[in-house]
Image: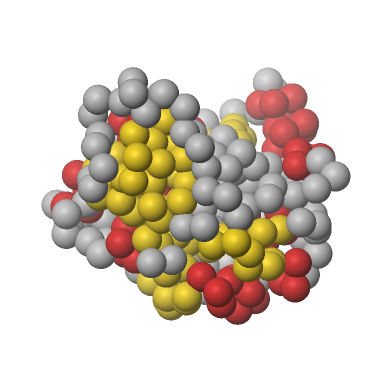
């Protein structure tokens, strides 16, 4: 299969198209032919070495987390899916990659593709949708009538978060950049971060013991259950994907370069098939 291989940390030049062996699935796994995947900021942050403490001496061989595609093969223990099914999903960062023609996944990590979206539209939603949903519902304990502030509201996670919060009957304030965000929290408010930092991982839990304002860090998880909720939101028109541009897989360097500007509105998608 064709794939984008990352053999070392560095600039976009380390992203190399190569022909590699396609994954071999176990009895409880599914092989998906990827039609489209997306570029997320975590991809180029991993690529340039920002998370070496988690990724080690070498980066993941293939980057990418979310995808949409067609089931190509199923293991003998798989009963829910069969070859030809259109699916979408998310593979957890640092484990496997979706910048490739095929990816192997578990049944609990995927779901049926929303029927009203193209593969490109679908591929831009799993990571940002799951991140936003889990941050709001699990991290922020969001409920109807709450007032929520979403920082970075024009980015992928922010756009999904605004729509999910509105669909749940919340009052939403969105900003595209801000300083001293903690000062805007009311006593008892919760600030949910979607990327780890020293302050949030080490200082946050300690300070949470003595102050009313809380900080939580989200570790986004692949979840078929949560994907089903997102699918309902999509098919009911409450969650609409926003795509800035679709690139052929071979132009992944250009997509990373654009993403690194920090000015992307919506998502950047890579078309594989």
In this rendering, position of residue 213 left or right of residue 46: left
Look at the image and tell me whether residue 142 can be seen. no
Q: Position of residue 240 (x, y in %)?
A: 27, 61
Look at the image and tell me whether residue 206 can be seen. yes
Location of the C terminus (image quadrant): bottom left
Q: Position of residue 199 (x, y in %)?
A: 76, 40
46, 62: nearer the viewer: 62
Residue 12 position (above or below residue 91) = below
Residue displayed at 68% across by 21% down: 209
In this rendering, position of residue 12 left or right of residue 160: right
In this rendering, position of residue 62 left or right of residue 34: right
Residue 252 appears in which quarter of the rendering? bottom right
177, 128: nearer the viewer: 128
Residue 122 appears in which quarter of the rendering? bottom left
Residue displayed at 35% across by 40% down: 73
Residue 2 appears in which quarter of the rendering? bottom right
Q: Position of residue 143 (x, y in %)?
A: 31, 34
Residue displayed at 63% across by 74% down: 253
41, 47: nearer the viewer: 47
* Coloration mode: secondary structure
Total marks placed = 0
Residue 95 position (above or below residue 165) = above
85, 46: nearer the viewer: 85
Residue 14 position (above or below residue 99) = below
In this rendering, position of residue 148 left or right of residue 212: left
Which residue sits furthest right? Answer: 57
Residue displayed at 61% across by 39% down: 95
């Amino acid at each position: 299969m064709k794939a984008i291989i990352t053999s070392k940390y560095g600039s976009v030049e380390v992203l190399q198209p190569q022909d590699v062996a396609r994954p071999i699935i176990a009895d409880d796994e599914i092989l998906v032919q990827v039609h489209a995947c997306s570029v997320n900021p975590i991809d180029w942050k991993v690529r340039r070495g920002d998370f070496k403490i988690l990724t080690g001496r070498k980066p993941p061989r293939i980057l990418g987390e979310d995808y949409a595609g067609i089931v190509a093969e199923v293991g003998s223990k798989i009963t829910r899916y069969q070859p030809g099914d259109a699916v979408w999903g998310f593979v957890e960062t640092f484990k496997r990659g979706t910048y490739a023609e095929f990816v192997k996944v578990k049944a609990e990590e995927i779901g049926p593709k929303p029927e009203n979206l193209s593969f490109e539209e679908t591929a831009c939603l799993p990571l940002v949708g799951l991140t936003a949903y889990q941050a709001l519902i699990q991290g922020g304990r969001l409920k109807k009538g709450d007032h929520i502030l979403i920082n970075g509201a024009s980015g992928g996670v922010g756009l999904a978060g605004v729509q999910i919060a509105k669909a749940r009957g919340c009052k939403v304030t969105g900003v595209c950049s801000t300083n001293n965000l903690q000062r805007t929290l009311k006593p008892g408010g919760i600030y949910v971060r979607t990327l780890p930092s020293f302050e949030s991982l080490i200082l946050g839990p300690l300070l949470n013991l003595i102050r009313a304002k809380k900080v939580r860090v989200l570790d986004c998880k692949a979840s078929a259950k949560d994907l089903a909720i997102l699918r309902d939101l999509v098919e009911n028109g409450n969650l609409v994907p926003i795509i800035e541009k679709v690139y052929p897989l071979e132009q992944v360097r250009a997509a990373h370069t654009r993403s690194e500007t920090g000015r992307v509105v919506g998502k950047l998608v890579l078309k594989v098939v």
